[in-house]
Image (tube, grey):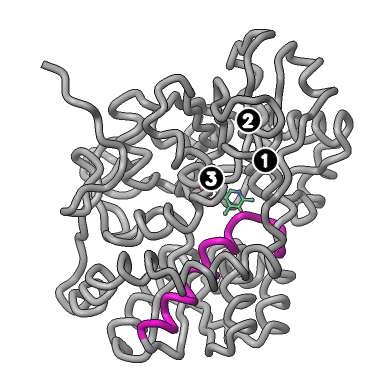
Amino acid sequence: MTTAQQYNVNEKGYYGEFGGAFIPEMLYPNVEELKNNYLSIINDPAFKAEFDALLKDYVGRPTPLFLAERLSEKYNTTIYLKREDLCHTGAHKVNNTIGQALLAKRLGKRRIVAETGAGQHGVATATVCALMGLECIVYMGEIDIERQAPNVARMKMLGAEVRAAKSGSKTLKDATNDAMRHWINNPVDTHYIIGSVVGPHPYPDMVARFQSVISEEIKWQLQEKTGKTNPDYVIACVGGGSNAAGAFYHFLDDAQTQLVAAEAGGHGISSGFSAATTFLGKPGVLHGSRSILMQTEDGQVVEPHSISAGLDYPGIGPMHAHLFDTKRAKFFAITDEVALKAGFQLSKLEGIIPALESAHALAALEELGAKSNETVVINLSGRGDKDLATYMKHL
Ligand SMILES: *Cc1c(COP(=O)(O)O)cnc(C)c1O
């Protein structure tokens, strides 16, 4: 017997066997408050109007769907780029931080706490807090603060307080712990903004809904340009998976569109320096939800590696674990080297310098085998200005 697969979250917060909320008891009240209110707030017409207006006038949406003619010629197929790189602040992340900040205000919160690794999510959070007059505290590992000085400066200029996480390896994991602790100690007036489709339910679903504007736009834009709403392929890179969730969202139930996820292969899947979660990982609990993660035999999280900070994560969100498990999405592992090459290629062919994360999605074209009569949409999650130093090292 066949039953229709469900790719969206169910009432219990699960995507198939993945998802849920695995959190310390101290966090129950905060997460419950969010879970009980997020849908009614997001679906309220007044909320929607305010969110849409900011996406339009502040972020610059709709972002263009661009026919990349020279790239199409190179791969002998038809390729459109969804230009999230043109969003205010240079990537898709701001779609989510605007949504969550508006939601936090509806819940009566006046302070925002967030964690950041490379600083991209911290900057997107500091940006919307400035816009909305919310207090902003960003936790960041002490080592990351040294490595990512320009983003620390941006956050400070935007009025955020950057607090150093000084325990453990002094990186993202430790910043996450500190942010959690802050939220536990300030449950009434603080909202915690998670930057991807990870974390306990309802975060993955909430973030996916805020990012789903990407595929909503792709559908009508493609209709306008080609007369059909569905491409043959949608490709996106996956760190935690928020830009991919947004690009896939309105195609999840359209079997004629193949979903393609590009993970960071690092130095190669079996090199010991990789972030290719679906190739190397096993089911387990990470950051509050059950998903697939890279772990040792006894369940210790394995340190990931990617040339791109945004993909340098040992897991993927539960929605993507389910898309992998059900084979609804096809996963590729793209090495640092191949991603760099794709980044240089797009720059020279189309005059667009992509973020290194997005370059992984572009590189999937090499293995995709799209035919000449097919249409491919690639989600260009961000711009490459932040990655220029890395690109130059490999020129
Ligand atoms: C953060 C980031 C990513 C990875 O995050 P997802 O949640 O997987 O989308 C990808 N691209 C860019 C440009 C980013 O800044």
Q: Nearer the viewer, residue 81 or 187?
A: 81
Q: Is residue 155 above or below residue 15?
A: below
Q: Which residues are magenta?
A: 88-107
Q: Look at 29% across and 41% down and name the residue there.
A: 296
Give amino acid for label 3.
Answer: Glu
- Identify the mark nearer the N-term, 2 or 3: 3
| Tags 3 and 1 touching, CB below 8 Å | no
Q: Which residue is disc 3 drawn over?
A: 216
- Label 3 neighbourhood size at 10 Å, few (<14), some (14-19), many (20+)? some
SS category of the residue bearing label 1: strand
- Identify the mark nearer the N-term, 2 or 1: 1
Give amino acid for label 1.
Answer: Lys
Give the alpha-carbon distance from disc 3 to disc 1, as whole Å: 11 Å
Residue 163, percent across and down? Answer: 53, 83
Q: Look at 37% across and 31% down and name the residue there.
A: 253
SS category of the residue bearing label 2: strand
| Tags 2 and 1 touching, CB below 8 Å | yes
Q: Which residue is disc 1 drawn over?
A: 82
120 drawn magenta: no
- Label 1 neighbourhood size at 10 Å, few (<14), some (14-19), many (20+)? many
- Which is closer to the viewer, label 3 or label 1? 3
Residue 361, percent across and down? Answer: 61, 33
In the rendering, which numbered label is found on residue 377? 2
Q: Look at 23% across and 38% down and name the residue there.
A: 297
- Label 2 neighbourhood size at 10 Å, few (<14), some (14-19), many (20+)? many
Is the CB–ligand 1 distance for label 3 below 8 Å? no
Q: Is residue 269 at least partly visible in the picture?
A: no
Instruction: Quadrant for residue 129, please give it.
Output: bottom right
SS category of the residue bearing label 3: helix
